[in-house]
Amino acid sequence: MIGTTEGSSFLASDVPAILKFTRQVYYIDNLQVGRIRPGEVLFYDLNGDEVQLPLTEITWDTAAAEKDGYEHFMLKEIHEQPRAVRDTLNSLIRDGAVDLSGAGLTDDILRSIRRIDMVACGSAWHVSVAAQYVIEDLAGLPVRVELASEYRYRRIPSSPDTLVIVISQSGETADSLAALRVAKERGALTLAVVNVIGSTIAREADHTLYTLAGPEIAVATTKAYSAQLIAMDALAVRLALVRGAITEEKCAELITALQAIPDQISRVLEEKQRLQWFSSKIVNTHDIFFIGRGLDYAISLEGSLKMKEISYIHSEAYAAGELKHGTISLIEHNTLVIGVLTQGSLFEKTLSNMLECKSRGAYLMGLTTNGNFSVEDSVNFTVYVPKTDEHFIASVAIVPLQLLGYYTSVNRGLDVDKPRNLAKSVTVE
């Protein structure tokens, strides 16, 4: 992007780099040329003809790009999640109802949808996996989740009643952008869920739903993930209502549950000292397995990614029922197995899978909701999170796993905000 102010112009890869100097920026399109002079920027197409680009006003506070007393940006951004979730919810809920008019999604459009394809990479893909469970259960719509790097090379049939949702924090992710273009070529309706106003994916999608996480500096996403997740939950609630899958009363209950999540996240953050202590005990672990069933599996995927990308400890997530189909052969003495146990109907089955690991020498951590104190009889360490509607528990349950990854990385003396070999925005294939 290109920023300008009186007497100066700036070229940067992302907004935080120039916030101290200007809030007036241009986002240049592909196949365009920018000519930068002090205080003046002109744009041309490849024929040399001048083109006019809109000037975007950045509303972020400069402090958002600073650590503000925290040791690392990642820790600061973990603590900013209540605000990020609340701001995103406030942009989508008006007068006690989910309102998607800002994204151009009318109720008629939502009623016309017959299938949803969710396309993303990394943590955004994990958001999609979680949203798949919620949308299918609440709205009764079939949802398929695709990795963007695979979707673009597959011949997946689409039609105007297929909604393809592309999720990307930066709005510039190369594979996600390519997948969006493929979806449009195939005739699908497209929705971008992005955090950066004016980004390429936002501009090219038929509809755009902005998350309000603010600038995220740490490479490992936390608050952007949580903002995406809550946006998908709100979309699921609206889909369910307009399609007649839930009543107005049930919808009101779900919205109340959504609005309570920011405070519930804050309560989880108050218990971070226990996780800091536990991370010191596992700092020399070589292998960690995160397991869960249903929505707990989606939570495990993101928890495992947070651990591996910043602590460099080998970590994998598995649907708990799949352990016996090969993976349990890797369990040995003191292998750490973290079980996510927030879904009441699946609680006993996942706990049984954890005990299978324990009998083979595994060290167990359980993550569950308040009240499930019987877990302590079976596992070595237990983390509790506040109860909420089970459809939305991922927003609360992911926070302890983010903190565990963070403190483990700190205890290993690693560069938390800039892990090796990774980039914040993946703009290459």
Image (tube, rainbow, N blue to C red):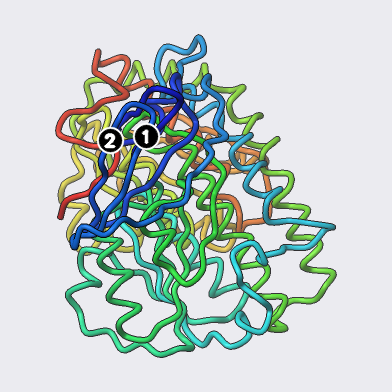
- How many C-alpha atoms fall within 10 Å of the one at disc 1: few (<14), some, or many (≥20)? some
> In the depicted view, which residue is nearer to us: 94 or 410?
94
Q: Quick check: 71 above or below 288?
A: above
Amino acid under label 2? Ile
Q: Residue at x 40, y 51 (%)?
A: 199
- In the picture as drawn, the residue positioned furthest to the top comes out as 69
Q: Position of residue 83 (x, y in %)?
A: 63, 34
Is label 2 in a helix, a strand or a loop? strand
Residue at 22% in and 52% down: 328
**Up/down of 130 relative to 183, above or below:** above
Q: Which mark is residue 40?
A: 1
Where residue 189 appears, as percent x and y from the top left, is 45, 79
The residue carrying mark 2 is 36
Provide the secondary structure element on which disc 1 rests: strand
In this image, 121 relative to 144: left or right? Answer: left
What separation in Å lies between label 2 and label 1 (alpha carbons)? 6 Å
**Residue 155's spot in the image, x, y percent?**
22, 84
Cβ–Cβ below 8 Å for labels 2 and 1? Answer: yes
In the picture shown, does residue 97 fall above or below 354?
below
In the rendered view, tell whether residue 90 sits above or below residue 419: below
Q: Residue at x 30, y 46 (%)?
A: 357
Q: What numbered label is drawn on residue 132?
A: none
Q: Position of residue 305 (x, y in %)?
A: 31, 42
Q: Nearer the viewer, residue 363 or 270?
A: 270
Q: Is residue 209 left or right of residue 335?
A: right
